[in-house]
Image (spheres, grey):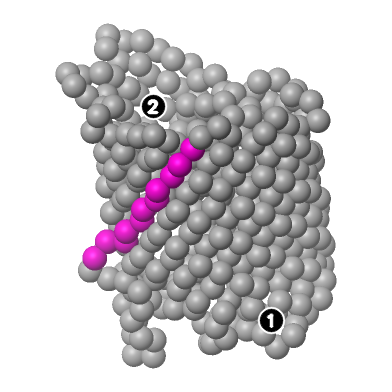
Amino acid sequence: MKKIILASSIALMGSTAAHAVDLKAGDWTVSVGGIVNAYYTQVSCSGDAVGGIALADRGLGCGGKGNRTTIGNGLLPSGLITSVKSRQGEYDVGGTIGIMTATSTDSAIGANSAVDVRQGFFTFGNGSMGTIKLGRDYGIFGSSAILGDMTLLGAGSPNRATQQGRVTLGHIGAGYSYLGTYGQIAYTSPASGGLTFSAALVSPVDAAPFTSGSSPQFQGQVGFGSDGFKGWVGAKTQKFDGNATNADFTMSGAEIGGSFTSGPFGVLANVQTGKGLGILSDGDQGNTKSTNYFLQGTYKVTPQVKLGLNFGESKNRDQNALTGNLESNSNVTGGVYYSITPSITLVGEIGQTRSKGFNGTSSRLSGGSLGGIFFF
């Protein structure tokens, strides 16, 4: 897996190499790079109305209709990412700003002016003390699962409700929690015998009708890597304040996973469990207990062509008013990924997302995507 130096969110995401433009100015190196992608997606929705955040229902899956077509982003947005770095005294210092945008909107004449600034942070540290990060960036919990997901280069579950003006879901809410973007103060230790440790104090978030408490969210992860194997254990927690009809609760989640690559073969497995993990964002189902699991296998037919199949499910263990009857979302995706150049990968995927209710109802979103992604 080659390094993509554009941003921390993309550094482990695929076999495509990006070549940012590096400019030297005294002791500083300025790198400018980015992502552009577009996918033709066709989806059809059938079955019952399940309710809650049912990803396969017509409302979220097909924008209220039986069939939908979109030409928009995949799981990643398009974006311009600028980073700087320097060595000052005993410290390596740097900063990153990532400005993202959507490909598809619902207007042919309206300004596509919505800007998604996912990253804006600076770092300092060295090989003996590790690295401290301050600013806005992706979270730690869930990062290994989504960065290892083959559909990060594609679309995964191409839900109309999120792709229009934003991105598709991959396996978010149907296999793992979204890693999120937060204001944070984070620390990453230097590697020691293959072990690393990361922890972050994260600005707490709201989840209507709940509001954030007076203390920060905490996220942490221990990772290990050696000879094609990577393993990780993570956790996160935050207190949410309720109201007259909803009691306070504390989100708490744990995660364990691993990946292994041997020659052309690759496998990945990840499990998350806890309370308040949500479907699309922290706490969006209140204090519901849930379990997410994600499995993936890939095979490189040639150095340029990779085949893959993955499956994920997010399952609620509580039936309450906050789930809206939703018991589970699941998604299976098969894909072909062809790197025609070091910067361009063409992608074809087919898959199905299913939602099930506690009362026996079920809905299906069937679809596919065809397009590509470009790194520079």
Packing grade of label 1 (10 A; few <14, some 14-19, many >=20) is many
Q: Where does label 1 land, which residue?
A: 357
Placement of 188 over or under 87, stated as above or below = below
In this rendering, the count of numbered labels is 2
- The kind of residue on which mark 1 rests is Gly
- Assign the C terminus to one quadrant of the image: top right
The majority secondary structure of the magenta stretch comes to strand
Label 2 amino acid? Ser
Q: Does residue 369 appear in the picture of this structure?
A: no
State the image quarter where residue 122 is shown.
top left
Cα gap from disc 2 to disc 1, whole angstroms: 45 Å
User: Which residue occupies 82% across, 71% down?
Assistant: 46
Report x, y in % for residue 119.
Answer: 40, 41
Residue at x 43%, y 55% (from the top left corner):
234
Say above or below: 336 vs 126. below
Q: Is residue 190 magenta?
A: no
Where residue 152 sits: x, y (%)? Answer: 62, 43
Answer whether residue 223 is magenta in the image: yes
Label number found at residue 127: none
Is 249 in front, or is 208?
249
* Relative to 164, 184 lies left or right: left
77 lies above or below 325: above
The residue carrying mark 2 is: 83
Q: Which range of residues does the magenta coloring cover?
A: 215-225
Q: Residue furthest left?
A: 89
Q: Residue at x 57, y 26 (%)?
A: 2
Q: Taking 128 as reference, is 9 left or right?
A: right
Q: Are marks 2 and 1 in contact (CB under 8 Å)?
A: no
The answer to whether residue 137 is left or right of residue 87 is: right
Residue 365 visible, this orientation: yes
Question: Disc 2 on helix, strand or loop?
Answer: strand
Q: Residues within 10 Å of mark 2 (few under 14, many from 20)?
A: many
